[in-house]
Image (cartoon, rainbow, N blue to C red):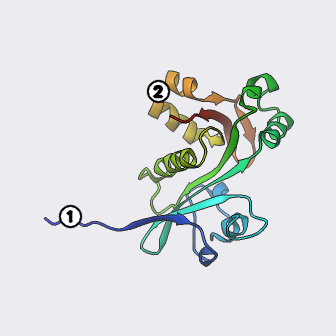
Amino acid sequence: MKDKHTDYFLRRITQNDVERSFQTIREEFNTSSRTLKAYVKEDRDCNDDGVFITYVFGKYEKIYGIARMRPMSFDDFKQEILKKEIFNLNLIKEYANSQVLYMSRVGVSKDVDGLGFGVMLRSFLDGHARTIFSNFLLYAYINESMFDSMIRTFGEKEFFKKYKVSKQLYDEKWKNNWVILREFKSI
């Protein structure tokens, strides 16, 4: 039997992606247009007022995943965290000299959900950030399924050793969620 291999791609989002279809199985993660239009608009290479660094992953012409991050200053991070009362100042002041990276979104198409592409994209973002910044603080929101997945992956003790985890948060759109922080230092 002959192995069948397929070429996948992982690249920055472009203006040409604006009308490409993209839907996840979780309705709250989908845009109203069900396309990449909003992601293109918010990307800093595609628009002057964009703030995110956005990557798309796929096979042939089909987009299977999206991953994006936003570099931010410690002062902006501190203001956001304190305003939302997620962590107190004593827990975050040790990061005052770190570049902060908000890992805003890892989404996988409903066509390939459950194949592990979300974990791959999250790992790519972490690794990519390490090639750009020697020291940075990863800042991300995770939902309940991501929380459970990270505990299964790392084990509960190791997960809480690697990450600072906020108290459980809740809102109507995202339901149960947490903020995680992890400092990455150059090797």
* Residue 14, image quadrant: bottom right
Which residue corresponds to the image point at 70% horizontal and 31% vertical from the top-left? 168
How far from the left and from the top, in percent, is residue 76?
81, 43
How far from the left and from the top, in percent, is residue 43?
69, 64
Amino acid type of the residue tagged 2 in the rendering? Gly
Q: Earlier in the sequence, mark 2 or mark 1?
A: 1
What label sits on residue 3 in the rendered view?
Answer: 1
Amino acid type of the residue tagged 1 in the rendering? Asp
How many marks do you count on the picture?
A: 2
Residue ID for mark 2: 155
Task: Pick the residue in front: 90 or 136.
Answer: 136
Q: Secondary structure at mark 1?
A: loop
Q: Residues within 10 Å of mark 1 (few under 14, many from 20)?
A: few
Q: Is residue 176 left or right of residue 58?
A: right
Task: Pick the residue in front: 142 or 47.
Answer: 47
On the question of residue 32 being in view, the answer is no
Q: CA distance from mark 2 to mark 1?
A: 35 Å
Which residue corresponds to the image point at 73% horizontal and 35% vertical from the top-left? 169
How far from the left and from the top, in percent, is residue 124?
50, 50
For this orientation, the residue located farthest to the left is: 1
How far from the left and from the top, in percent, is residue 97?
73, 34
Q: Is residue 28 left or right of residue 89?
A: left
